[in-house]
Amino acid sequence: MSNELFDIDPIELQFHFELNKQISCSQYLTNKTDSYVAFKVKTTNPKRYCVRPNIGVVLPGSSIEVVVIMQAQKEVPADMQCKDKFLVQCFVASPGAIATEITTEMFNQEAGHRVEETKLRVVYVDPPLLPSPEQLKRGSNRNQSGGGILIRTRWYISARGLRRRTVKGGEVAIHG
């Protein structure tokens, strides 16, 4: 999704919902202009989410990652539906502008400022399927042959959570 100033990807915030676990989701704002663009991210439920950075400036032709963290939830929502929304506001800033110079008042359309707004919805999705504990114990070695290239996948637990290490034709890739 995009507006005149930013391409926003993805167009909805997807959280792999798990009880009692803080979950994050990344959003990328890409400045498609030749100007500095200031942005602010707002939500309908500020106690549930933490947005970093929630205000800033994106240089011409550049992108920024905005991380949205949903606080741990104690209950499963009915039908895994979420009514929370986010609003990305942006405007053309002065050349050389920096985040500390951007104020909340600059996003006030009623004061005559030209501010573009894009609404984003929140979607809860089931967490990815995990291998069985038995597969984790033995490393879930799975050898496959594809055109003479050996592919080997190993699941393991790291400090960053469940990870998958794939070796294909001597190249190693870590997924997670």
Image (cartoon, rainbow, N blue to C red):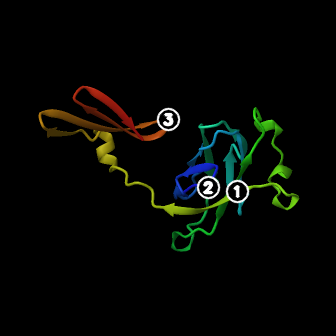
Q: Position of residue 48 (x, y in %)?
A: 68, 58
Disc on the earlier residue, 1 or 2: 2
Q: Which mark is residue 3?
A: 2
Q: Residue furthest bottom?
A: 78
Q: How many marks?
A: 3
Q: Are marks 3 and 1 in contact (CB under 8 Å)?
A: no
Q: Quadrant of the N terminus?
A: bottom right
Which residue type carries mark 1?
Answer: Glu
Disc on the earlier residue, 3 or 2: 2
Q: Are marks 1 and 2 in contact (CB under 8 Å)?
A: yes
Q: Position of residue 13 (x, y in %)?
A: 56, 57
Element carrying mark 2: loop
Q: Which residue is mark 3?
A: 159
Above or below, 132 relative to 168: below
Element carrying mark 3: loop
94 or 100: nearer the viewer? 94
**Quadrant of residue 53 within the rendered picture:** top right
27 or 93: nearer the viewer? 93
Mark 1 Cα-neighbour bin, 10 Å: few <14, some 14–19, many ≥20: some
Which residue type carries mark 2?
Answer: Asn
Q: Quadrant of the C terminus?
A: top left
Q: What is the distance, in whole Å, between disc 3 and disc 1 at their CAs?
A: 40 Å
44 or 62: nearer the viewer? 62
Above or below, 129 relative to 84: above
Q: Are marks 3 and 2 in contact (CB under 8 Å)?
A: no
Residue at left offset 64%, top offset 65%: 84
11 or 164: nearer the viewer? 11
Q: Which residue is mark 1?
A: 116
Which residue type carries mark 3?
Answer: Ala
